[in-house]
Image: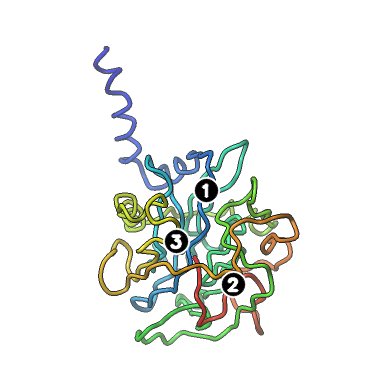
Amino acid sequence: MRRLRALLPLLLALAIFAAPDLARAQVDVAVSIRVAPPPLPVYVQPAIPGPGYIWTPGYWAYGPAGYYWVPGTWVLPPAVGLLWTPGYWGWVNGAYLWHAGYWGPRVGFYGGVNYGFGYIGVGYVGGYWAHGVFAYNRAVNNFGRVHITNVYNKTVVNNVHVTRVSFNGGPGGLGARPSAAEEAAAHDQHTPPSALQAQHEHAASVNHNSFASVNHGRPSVAATSRAGEFHGHGVVAARPAPVHNVTHQPGPAAHGPQPAEHPENHGEPHGGADHGGGHPGGEDHHG
């Protein structure tokens, strides 16, 4: 009995890793930290590998050695019609909790964090599904030399206070709250991150240079064209942050875009320009 009791922690860990992805995603929400995550790095988006890929922004994850950067990358969605809702850190009862990202029929709440490249703090303006095919907004996606036929051009006007703050609530955090549409999206059927996305995060967790204590907020691998590939062509390093970008929010007036002030966004264009916290094409993006 004593030996069995000693093995219980190991058996629990094995059960978590053997469980379905959804169970692991629910475990992720339980991760709570007392120290706020660093500001988002600044980097350019690597070129898309091919048609059908959707951009998933980078984020700070947490491990035994502290925060480490999981690079932004292009991912094939697990099914036609699904969009990615990024994860985010939220301040709850004196701790920072991680709310894991997921795939769903519409983009839900991700803390108001402006990850860039179409993820402007609310919704997604980088593309939309139409008749089983994903159409890309040329203004916020980097095609490189890849030929993408389903494209449109919709400028994202940067008319709000752009911030690199990577968490919601608490001292210096974003003040965004979910809109009614985002609350409804939380009840949609969700698909957890794919096995490839999980491998991508694991690769970052064992990369010494991914840790904030080493890279000081400027990871050498800030984004990759393909998930899990941290070397060679398609790897992008972080750049120095522009001096006009702030790392903390001094008060409510400086908060990023509030979901309640925007119409429901399923990723579909609605004509004209998108007004929000995104970055016009051709500029450095963070996210």
Q: Where 226 sits versus 64, above or below?
A: below
| x and y percentages locating residue 162 in the rendered image | 62, 67
Can residue 36 be seen here? yes
**On the picture, is 119 further left or further right than 60?**
right
Work out whether mark 1 precedes mark 2 in sequence or the reverse, and give the earlier one: 1
Q: Residues within 10 Å of mark 2 (few under 14, many from 20)?
A: many
Rendered location of residue 4, percent (x, y): 26, 18
Q: Tell me the amino acid under the disc marked 3.
A: Gly
> For the residues marked 2 and 3, what is the alpha-carbon distance in whole angstroms?
15 Å
Q: Nearer the viewer, mark 1 or mark 2?
A: 2
Q: Position of residue 109 (x, y in %)?
A: 60, 56
| The label number, if any, that marks residue 99 in the structure image | 1
Q: Is residue 47 left or right of residue 181?
A: left
User: Which residue is rendered at x = 44% and y = 74% of the image?
Assistant: 44
Considering only order in the chain, which callout, 3 or 2, is on the residue closer to the N terminus? Answer: 3
Q: Quadrant of residue 79?
A: bottom left
Q: Give the quarter of the figure containing the N terminus.
A: top left
Picture residue at 30% right of the left edge, 40% below the top: 18
**Left or right of 208 in this view: 102:** right
Q: Nearer the viewer, residue 115 or 164?
A: 164
Residue 76 seen in the figure: no
Assign a secondary structure to mark 1. Answer: strand
Amino acid type assigned to the residue bearing label 2 in the image: Gly
Where residue 120 sits: x, y (%)? 59, 67
Report, in whole angstroms, how far the alpha carbon at label 1 lies from the one at label 2: 22 Å
Q: Give the residue pinned by disc 2.
A: 278
> Compared to 275, does 7 lie above or below?
above
Q: Label 1 amino acid?
A: His
For marks 3 and 1, give the CA distance: 14 Å
Dot label at residue 58: 3
